[in-house]
Amino acid sequence: MFAGIGGMGYGLMQAGWNCVGYAEWDKFAHQAYEILHDPEKRMWSAYDVRAVTDDNLRLLRDERGPIDLLAGGFPCQSFSIAGKRQGFRDATRGTLFFEIVRWASVLRPRHLLLENVVGLLNHDEGRTFETVIGTLDELGYVGEWCVLNSAAYVPQNRERIFIVASLRGSGGRKIFPFGGENRNALKQFSDGEGIAYCLDTGYAKGIAATGWEKARRTHIIEPIAVLTPDREEKRQNGRRFKEPGEPMFTLTAQDRHGVAIIQQGRGFNKGGLHETAPTLTKNSWEHNNHLYDGYRIRKLTPLECFRLQSFPDEWYYKLKEAGISDSQLYKMAGNAVTSVVAYEIGKRLIQSVKEPTL
């Protein structure tokens, strides 16, 4: 449910789950999901989850067999600090949680996996989250939850709450908590060496998902994360710039973050650290010492945003070839679940079922 372009689903599938159906109302995201994961249209699919009747769901269950997992990142704008925080009072988005409840009441999956912004925890002084957990309990599901940060795997500070709810009496081990940095997980999403390259510049290919240590060890570049370059007044937790090596600000559907790169000494290029960053260019080393008044910053490309979500580069090229605009690609990346985080949860969940289906 609320599949987007399949960030959560891809991570689960990499962990060994088999996806049998998806629902996504945004026509561009739905098109992208189909291109990336279901080009032959073999899966069950829907647009508006509210338009899927109970009979439709029973037919899905009868045709596909028992559903072990129902997953979805239900719309978060109602609970986000960036939104109006109307919660369940938002008639179009906030109430979609109860569509998850309706689907689960019919499909009766063994597990539910839900994702949302951290603001869900304290919205309405905690009463909204209490309603979520209490409703799942009334439905027969025992819930556990954990706040996970994508920065443990990719250079993006993205805290999200994940809820795993299991049918009462179904057994299985607890999924949370788990922590630490499991770089081996990146092998599922990168070049096979546990490195997910992020910056899309010729000389900067060494910038890796391991917090850019590899690039820094070469004494060549110091990437600096910049919040929405075209909105100078905007701040995230009071900050507009990160320190070199810190993860990128959280990707969203609305913001277009940027990067400034400080060139350090190399050969004939004297380099050095400056109060202002050298001009960011694609190729020549010497050009990066040309200074402007203030910082010279460029926006992240859609490909870089996909990499920050641990998506394969192939996704970007397929969607570009299909004619999907950059503005939609930015939105898709900002709305998505980081795949490698879903993978870590999925591989723990899979131990609780014998023949997993998503």
Image (cartoon, helix red, strand yellow):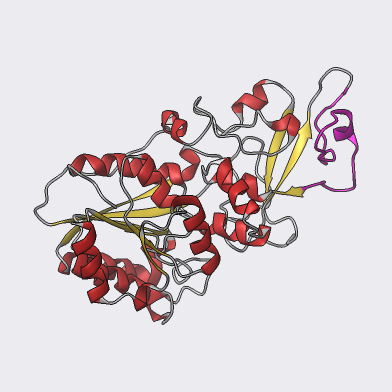
Q: Is residue 295 above or below residue 114?
A: above
Residue most toward the front?
40
Q: Nearer the viewer, residue 114 or 192?
A: 192
Is 275 contained in the magenta span? yes
Q: In the rendered view, does 268 fall on the left or right side of 178?
A: right
Q: Is residue 207 above or below residue 291?
A: above
Q: Nearer the viewer, residue 116 or 346?
A: 346
Is 325 contained in the magenta span? no
Q: In this rendering, does residue 135 appear at all? A: no
Q: Is residue 163 above or below residue 139?
A: above
Q: Which residues are magenta?
A: 269-297
Number of marks: 0
Q: In this rendering, does residue 94 appear at all? A: yes
Residue 36, horizontal then vertical, whole percent: 49, 51
The quadrant in which residue 156 appears is top right
Q: Is residue 198 above or below residue 284?
A: below
Query: What's the magenta bit mostly, secondary-structure-wise?
Result: loop
Q: Quadrant of the N terminus?
A: bottom left
Residue 6, horizontal then vertical, whole percent: 45, 53
Residue most toward the left?
169
Residue 261, horizontal then vertical, whole percent: 75, 38
Residue most toward the top?
267
Residue for point 53% across, 70% down? 83
Residue 271, horizontal then vertical, whole percent: 84, 27
Residue for point 31% across, 40% down? 16
Residue for point 58% across, 41% down? 313
The quadrant in which residue 43 appears is bottom left
